[in-house]
Image: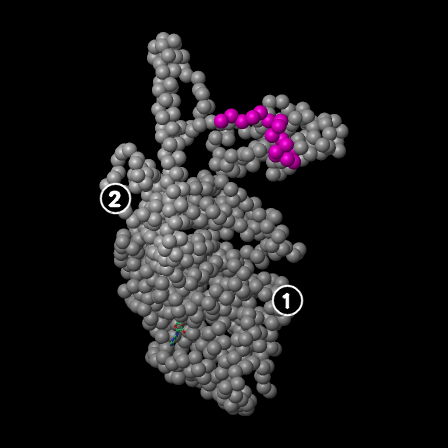
Amino acid sequence: MRFEIGPVQVNISMAPEISGRTRPTKPKKQARGIKRKRGDIDVDLTTLQAAVEELDTATTATSFTDLPLSAETKAGLDASHYTTLTDIQQKAIPLALKGKDILGAAKTGSGKTLAFLVPVLENLYRTQCIGPDAGLGAMVIAPTRELAIQIFDVLRQIGRKGHLFAAGLVIGGKGLREEQDALVRMNIVVCTPGRILQHLSQTAAFNVDGLRMLVLDEADRILDMGFQRDVDAIVDYLPRERQTMLFSATQTKRVADLARLSLREPEYISVHESASSATPKTLQQNYVLTPIPEKLDTLWSFLQSSKKSKIVVFLSSGKQVRFVYETFRHMQPGIPLLHLHGRQKQTARLEITTKFSNAKASCLFATDVVARGIDFPAVDWVVQVDCPEDAETYIHRVGRTARYERDGRAVLFLDPSEEEGMLARLEAKNVPIERINVRTKKQTSIKNQLQNMCFKDPQLKYLGQKAFASYVRSLHVQKDKTIFKLDSYPLEEYAASLGLPGAPRIKFLKADAEDVKRKKNASRQAAASESESGSDDDDEDGEKVKSKTEKPAVRTKYDRMFERQNQDVLADHYSKMIKSDDPTSNNALLDDDDAGDDLFDIKRRIPAASSSPEPDTAPDGDPEPDTRTSGPKSILLPGAKTPLILDSARRAKLLKSKKKLLQFKESGTKLVFDDDGTAHQIYELEDEAAFRARGEAEEQRKRFLDEEGERVKIADGEDKATAKAKRREKIVKRKERAKQADEDDAAGQQVGGGEQDAMANFLADAAGSDDESEAEEAPQAKKQKKWFQKDVEVEAEEGGREIETLDDLEAEAARLLG
Ligand code: ADP
Ligand code: MG
């Protein structure tokens, strides 16, 4: 009897290309593995089983070859270049092979994945839980899809050398049917809580009675509030007789949690508990004090100085991530940007994680959806722009760098109000962190750019408003009030730093947190509206939410678009304007007072007179009278004294032409503006008292007339002088032209002169452009220079002399022209 059911992973629901069997390079080795005789396998199994039983868990094996593992697993580990065991692997694997329940705690990046995957493969292999009829033997649960994919990938790697298990990934994002069909044949499933629960309750053929192993990666996360109900429900389906293993960098020890999972005398393995720090030794950790309104400046400046690095930037919500990503992208930071949050489509998420994994230099803006477990290779920096909710989250976030003996750096941005509380929490968890300062020289402000962008692009502003709201909401719902004191944040300035014209009002500020949560859930259930996200819960494991709110009908994005509530991109004052545009209100024309407050001025608004019961106002404000209805209508045009009676189709047509409407309006009045920009009538009546204070009326009249007479005289003199000068100039020019014509005739030709002229012209242009007041006259001045070389003379003869010669004339003209 042989269990040959094809490739190792028959049911890979994510990506078909990850079947390791298609590689043609080593066909011999594989064939050898598959061709082993049943008898050989039986011998193998008994010796293996004996070796495991004899294994002394006190002595530590340093190499995978020292452990009693199947040839297939050994080959897989070898092919993946895993040779020496890490601390947690040394301690956990022997115990797990013996079937013990395990609580494993080890720092981020210390190899916990293999610590449970190797025993999973081995224990199922030794009991020959292989093939479609064997049923499900092991279930590995991870809190996020990304992490589940990654675990599955490692499983695929180490299982690809001869193992015949059917393993699958169940994380949603695929058709339920497809997953159902695959599930019933699986021996090992890697999954997220929400989706697997859905199958447990809906897929009839999915039988878990034979399950032997349950693994929770990032166990404390899976056991916390967000997943509590799902996990309890899952465990209810599973047989009590099984091996349970919990792994995390921040392990739970709460008895209640363990009781929920019905662990039997678990072995608590904590390899780094006695270590001086809870984070990897190779990780350098710092924080900078950055008041929240300066956060983005600091982040931008940081990116400018680390363009060659691979960076993960953590923000508190998907909206924040989107806003920072979109705005920074516009400003071209010189480093490739990526962004990831729970509201993205699964395919996009996968694409982005792959892209970032393969990138050399890149900056990924992300929510806590990638805070845990994700093994991006060679990350240089982890930047926490928004303060993490607790020390655990901090530890997991920074754990994205300095993985498996590599170096890494982490920076945490702290608002001064957060400093004390957060540092105390980190100290309690043995996190060594030091303060550093931003070099003020390198700090650039991007506030103006952001303001510009938000002003020009309402979408960005909208995003900014959402980002602001979700950030404030996240602060509000934070549990640790010793760190997050909502009152101490300069929120107005923060809004301004995002480029917003003012801090959007956030209604829930008054309501208590519970209330908000309840409302949020209710609205989600009702419409699954996309617009409200932000908490970590919905960023992580987005499918969980979906499974609860699954509706029978297919909903398109247009459905969602129309259901969307908060589409108000426009500022308050503009909304006000729209409101007053309400056709049911008769006084749609704003009073002057109202209009003065608004940014936009209303050019033309034609309200219906009160006599018409239903004014026909098209949305754009243009009247669209319905001439089919009987009876004349009257319309009051702005600026017209008498209403316009619309008693015929022809008259109604008038409304379409602005020009024709002019004749019905009063002619406009001319205004002058003073230095302050205030409009005045050209003649304004003076206050009588002030007028009298200046003397007798008759006297004043006389004085006025005299003054005006004098002014007119002077102006007249000036005008005459200018006219005279112009006349003279004309004469000069005429003569010059005549002279030039004579010279040309005489000299015949002057080669190269043109070139020189051009140069002279250019220089004169350059000189002239310095003084704008000369601009108009300049061409003439240049022409003269071109023709007359006697600049010195011209200067010398300056002055109001009588004009006798041609030279005098030139001089006079030049003087007048300045
Ligand atoms: P953790 O779950 O503890 O955060 P992972 O299991 O994700 O850590 O492993 C972190 C990195 O270390 C991975 O890139 C993995 O390939 C590598 N790694 C794990 N175990 C070994 C080993 N025994 N030898 C070499 N590299 C290892
Ligand atoms: Mg891990």
Disc on res. 113: none
In x, y percent, where is residue 91?
A: 37, 74
268 or 485: nearer the viewer = 485
Tag 2 secondary structure: helix
Residue shown at 52% from the left, 47% from the top: 520
**How far across and down, in percent of the image, does residue 388 sit?**
38, 55
Q: Left or right: 431 with respect to 354?
A: left
Q: Residue at x 33, y 43 (%)?
A: 771
Q: Relative to 56, is 73 on the left or the right?
A: right
Figure colour scheme:
one colour
Give the residue furthest to the front: 746
Element assignment for label 1: helix
Vertical side of 242 occupied by 221: above or below:
above
Residue at 49% across / 79% down in the picture? 159
Amino acid type at mark 1:
Arg
Residue topped by disc 1: 177
Residue indicated by mark 2: 793
Residue interval drawn in magenta: 655-670
State the residue in front, 808 or 458. 808
- Which mark is first along the chain, 2 or 1? 1
- Quadrant for the N terminus, please: bottom right
* Residue 378 percent location from the top left of the image: 37, 69
Q: Is residue 543 left or right of residue 804?
A: right
Residue beneath the point at 43% across and 41% down: 502
**Does residue 776 show up magenta in the picture?**
no
Image position of 802 with respect to 18: above or below: above
